[in-house]
Amino acid sequence: MKKEFYVFFIVIGISIVILLPIPLLSIRLSSYDTIDEYLSFTYEPILPGTIEKFYINADEADIEIRYVDPSFNYYAQIEVNILLSGAKLAEKSYENFLYISWNKTSSPANFTCKIISDNWYDPSLWVIKDVEIDISLRKDIIFDLALKVNKGDLRIYIPFGTAIHNIAANTTDGSISYELNQCTLSGNISGNTNSGNLKLNVNDILCLRNLIWNLSTQKGKLDIEIYQYKELGSNITSTISFTGILNLTYHDTLEEVAAFFTIPNMNWEPIGQTKINFTVETLNPTGFNLRSSDFPAENNYKILFFEPFDYKMDIRNNYS
């Protein structure tokens, strides 16, 4: 009898362990839902200015900036694609989870996408949020742009023939990508990320005044590619801060254009995973310099290992 009772107890126990989650799982699956929403906002100032200021602030989103043909109906268009998935969403809308504001009458015009605070005890707020913000700007309008996101990637594409002013891109948890292709710059550029990669691709730009570029990544890789086959117009001074890997490619075909890479004093022993890779082609060999009082032999510059530091880059026009 004792043996039979023991076996019976195990069977009951197994049936409870196996069967009990099934109704709970079916309840959870039956209440699982998604919210798929598309929003569109447009911008056209009442009194157009020489430079249009445009600021974007989001808690959690991927943001992409693209320039479009001047025949576009608006100065700018913001398209927001929202996909939310989780439990108990059947009778809810995106407004239960996201606060979206578009203020186009202020200066600067500003767009905000904020997450309504999550409460751990409310299952309806345990949702997966996928937000994409696509911004189309007319290429015949000069914009001053500021992009800030807590979690998400920032991608900025500046095409041929576009004139731009200041651009500031900041993300706490995400990557930043700049592509500047045969465009005209009259303002400074910055890109800062705490835990993502940063990429800057430059092809034959024209600077209307001396510019400053500030780039930094605390935990990611920094890729910089510069191809300058025509006169630069003015000088660019850049401060680069990173603790990971820097891949830098620089090409020019003019004696009037030169690049200087200034490295602070340091011990050149290999330190951890921090390193720098150079690829350089220039028709002005005297115009390309790597400056440091304790810099090793110049023929060793292609791969270097060093302690984390702030790194300075100067690109000069009309070098002498």
Image (spheres, helix red, strand yellow):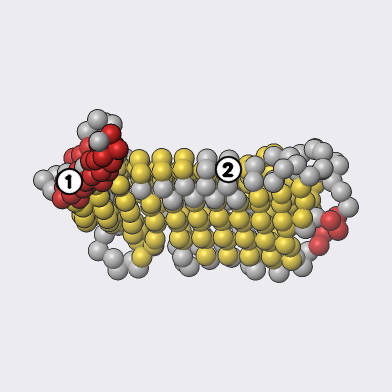
Counting other residues with Cα less than 10 Å from the Cα at mark 1, is it few (<14), some (14-19), or many (20 or more)?
few
- Which numbered mark, 2 or 1, is in the foreground of this view? 1
Disc 2/disc 1 C-alpha distance (Å): 45 Å
Asked if residue 206 lies left or right of residue 43, the reply is right
Q: Given the current orientation, which residue lies at the most extreme front position?
A: 1
Q: Given the current orientation, which residue lies at the most extreme left position?
A: 91
Tell me, for residue 219, which label it has, or none: 2
Counting other residues with Cα less than 10 Å from the Cα at mark 2, is it few (<14), some (14-19), or many (20 or more)?
some
- Relative depth, front residue between 83 and 315: 83
Residue receiving disc 1: 23
**Residue 247 location (% of width, % of height):** 66, 56
Rendered view: 232 above or below 94: below
Identity of the amino acid at label 2? Answer: Lys
Identity of the amino acid at label 1? Answer: Pro
Q: Determine the residue positioned at 82% across, 59% down.
A: 286
**Quadrant (top left/top right/bottom left/bottom right) for the C terminus:** bottom right
Res 295 seen here:
yes
**Quadrant (top left/top right/bottom left/bottom right) for the N terminus:** top left
- Relative depth, front residue between 195 and 247: 195
Q: Determine the residue positioned at 44% across, 51% down.
A: 154
